[in-house]
Image (tube, helix red, strand yellow):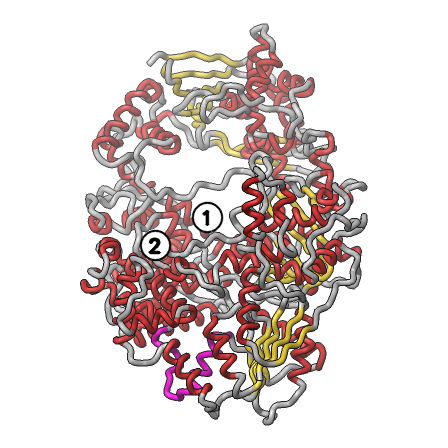
Amino acid sequence: MLYLYQANRLETLLELLLAVIRQPLPSPFEPEVVVVQSKGMARWITLQQAKRNGICANLQFPLPATFIWQLFRAMQADLPRRSGFSPDIMAWRIAEQLASSEVMALHPSLQHYLQQPDERRRYELAWQVADIFDHYLMYRPDWIEAWEQGRQLGLGEEERWQQPLWQRLAAQDSAPHRVRLLQHLLDRLAQGERPAHLPQRVILFGISAMPPAYVDILHGLSQQLDVCLFVLNPCQEAWGHLTRQPPQLDLLLEDAGPARPEDLYLDLGHPLLASLGRQGRDFMDMLVERHSGELHDLFVENEQPTLLARLQNDILYLREPAADHVLAEDDVSIQHHLCHSPMRELEVLHDQLLQLFEADPSLQPADVAVLMPDIHTYAPLIDAVFARREGVPYIPYGIADRSLLSQWPLLQVVEQLLQVAAGRFAAAEVLDLLSCPALARCFGIEEAELPLLRQWVEAAAIRWARDARHKAELGLPDDPAHSWQQGLDRLLLGVALPVELAEAEAPMFAGMLPVAVAEGSKAQLLARLAVFVEQLGQLHQRVAQPLSAADWVAQLHQVLEQFFDPDEDEQQAVQHLRDTLAQLLEDTTLAGFNQTFGLPWLRRWLQRHGSQAYGSTGFLSGGVTFCAMVPMRSLPFRVLCLLGLNDGDFPRQLRPQSFDLVAQHYRRGDRSRRFDDRYLFLEALLSARQVLYLSHVGFSIRDGQSLPPSPLLAELLDVIRLSCADPDALSRVTLAHPLQPFDARLFQPDAGRLRSYAAPYARAGVLAGLGEGSLAPLFQQPLPERVVDSASLEEWLQCFRNPARYLLRERLSIWLDEPRAEPEGYEPFELDWHARQTLRRWLQQAQGRPWGDAETVQCLVEADGLLPAGPMGGLMYQAERATLQPFLQALPGAAETLPPLPFHWQGQQLRLQGVLGQGNWRLTPSGLLGLRADRLRPADEFLLWIQHLLLCVLQPQNVACQSRWLAHDERNGAQWLQFERVAEPEPLLLDLEQAFCLAGNQPLPFFIKSAHAWFVAQQQGKDAMKAAERVWLPPEHRHPGQFGEGEQAYYHLLYRDHNPLDQTFCDWAQRLLAPMFAHREVSHEAG
């Protein structure tokens, strides 16, 4: 007997289900078979039954396809566990067929596509055809029967090659496929035969779509056993006739001119049911047409006086919208939220859920579900917003439907490892592999050591390629420059042969320039890096050629052993990959596929399997459930939230393949992503019990322009507008949120529904001063005074170079510097700024040395990896040397340089200690000398001035108390800056000490570039403040790379929209720079 139970609420169907299950089966050991569409539905039923009865046991929850195959095996015991016509196996069989010239000749388009050299085309096509043939088996069994009989049905050009291809597949495998098994099963059931292994009772729960062939099987089964269908029906009235609008009205509207918005809702019945319910309508019609048993209806009205209840009841009773509903002031049953980004959607959701929990203490996180079209986009953002954070109320949550790759990043690293091994060995890509803990652990490399490795790779000029032979394999000259082998050799040579050993000779060995950066125990880290790169190179050799499936499986098992040391949590990912490889071997074996294929297709196959959703982890786990929008997951929740309802994102756009004949010849009951998503939206609308929360990106994050919502959301909003008596009801349902989570409006007493609970953002909003329309300075008062009794010269120099950076780093541990760029993956084709500065240092260092001739220095520069390959690099070197010649000729000889001078100086508040004559400064008999093979900058002057004052205080023997700076001016050649002896340097140093101590407690308004411009203009009788502002503020007409001093990250954070160029700035500029300019002399030596 076939029993059909229908209701508009899943809870009602559940009570009916539990009542049926209470009727015992003949054997207490026989499991109850409940066919469901998803594992999530199975988990919900299990939890609900356990909640009501205290236990849930001896229930099986097969999916429809699995259940049907179990029926086939019950009728024919010798059937294998897996069919040779399942998509995963059939794809390999099709791939083998597509390689034959007979199949390619079936159609010109097929031949043209498959003759391309990329083998991935054949395998991708095979997978797509396998999916389409599987669809035919379920939804077009009559086509399959006709094709096997040699008949074509006039379905179009694509049938000309699909029919003979299917014939070849059917002839290749004698085992029956689903169409044959279906007919065999129906025939035996019609004859009254009941196989011994059939269950006593079959229950189907919550399924809203099914192939017609499956419905026929259920009808046949009902002749032999009880079949109970529990179906969710949104409407208690007959609505199978319902259309978007009657055809006669279309003709009338054409004659009447442009349609009014109200005309769109002149449907027969409820417009949302007509627009969204096509899939459910066709399924219900199919059931009714084949139903000959008992029908049980149990529809329940939503008795709440809310807008959501009104909408659900209108659908239940098939009522057209009538503008008579009065929206209560506290009615938040339907909420529409507009945000600027997916991140803001989640931040707003977090605050809105906290409001709901506060308003209703009985509401629990488990009563909330959040659905979104693309869970992979939102998953990392969910963790960022909902994870435990200081000062933010925590909401328990779980994320379901994440892919295997996102659930286990280790799987993605394996695929990435194969890609790098087969690729160019780009420096950044190789080092990125070591970011995987399991891989780095295998080679004994700590996460904290990765920045150091990146510095070493950059210092050794490693860009790409394993070695010279690798370049030759790619059709390039076999030059080892910038390869991993050359770079690692240079690093290892730096350990064994430090540059200092060269003494008077050029610091090269066998044409190679050592890089001495791995000192002491760090040499072991370098050795571990070398081992990793060596094994990666060996893997490159093993995966370079096509292999059979069995060989690929063996290679990947070796990769897991050789490159990964998984911890306890990662072992599950490794085991899953081993299971996946076992499936690959099983699929190809069952398909009889013995051909070889390359690494690109293996990686694509791994990606295909890794993109599948991983079980039901995170679904109904006790907190807020975040999951993907998937069909037939119409579980009831007190609060149901839909995020990402953006135009173009939902309904999801998935165009069928051009050769999909089902899409070209539609029949009632066919599935499509568009209709699935429409019915899914209707099910979600009916599954919300108290609140339906709708959110989309309604504003552009770039310019704030309005963005349209999903058409489905737009239809719902129009129905809301037509259902409410208040013309402003839609504006009360809709809430637009600010761009930033720290917007001060979110924390005002009258914020209302915009209110945020994030305390850290509240403090940031107050500091930002957004309510006043501008950003206030970060510091409103000094920090607690720190006690400092000593400081280094390096600290002083860093402080006066950028006082804001010093304060934020030292006192608040704020580091705003841009992250260091990843190592380049290509050889240099020009001299960038860093390469030019390094080249100039080489020229400067070589001056006056025995190996300082042009040819030797060029060899050194080339060995250092600074120049482009070939003659172009030589021309760039010669040009740079010629440009710098005046500067080089002015350099003092190596013999004139004295050893650095350690010192200490006791001030009034602290003890200053350090070394004079290090880095860019040299100590000579004629005084302190600063060197820069570039133009003179204000910071260079002031930092030399500080050290000059120390020199005048220390007065070392055999050293003159004067300081000079030698720079290179592109126009005027060598440029000299000189400071004469200061008679009383102590008071000036005390002023610097006072400024330094102040800078550690509060912002010091001394900005060297702006202050320098201010003082020069004052000396020249010009508008000094205007000159300083031109340097501080962003230029109105700037050149590329030109920025105002105030745009520097630390200054920008410290002062924000406030202009710090006030009288205090002028006082400090006068106090610190006036003595310097009084002892300063600048001269040029023409080049």
Q: Magenta part of the protein: which range?
A: 64-85
Q: Which mark is residue 415?
A: none
Q: Is residue 998 above or below residue 275?
A: above
| Percent of width and height locating residue 509 | 25, 43
Which amino acid, mark 2? Val
Please say if 761 is above or below 595: above
Q: Nearer the viewer, mark 2 or mark 1?
A: 2
Side of 735 relative to 555 (left or right) = right
Q: Residue at x 41, y 67 (%)?
A: 135
Q: Which residue is mark 1?
A: 451
The mark that comes first in sequence, 2 or 1, is 2
Kindly check if marks 2 and 1 are in contact, taking CB atoms under 8 A apart as contact: no
The quarter of the rendered structure image containing the N terminus is bottom right
Q: Quadrant of the C terminus?
A: top left
Does dot 2 land on a helix, a strand or a loop?
Answer: helix
x, y percent for residue 574: 44, 69
Residue 67 among magenta residues: yes
* Residue 547 in the image, given as x and y percentages of width and height: 25, 66
Asked if residue 968 is among those painted magenta in the image, a careful observer would answer: no
Please, what is the three-letter code of the amino acid marked with disc 1? Pro
* 52 left or right of 27 in image: right
Q: Residues within 10 Å of mark 2 (few under 14, many from 20)?
A: many
Q: Which residue is mark 2?
A: 420
Disc 2 from disc 1: Cα separation: 20 Å
Out of 382 and 117, give the one closest to the viewer: 117
Within 10 angstroms of label 1, few (less than 14), some, or many (20 or more) residues?
A: few
Q: Quadrant of residue 72?
A: bottom left
Near-viewer residue (613 or 182): 182
- In the rendered image, the residue lying farthest to the top is 1021
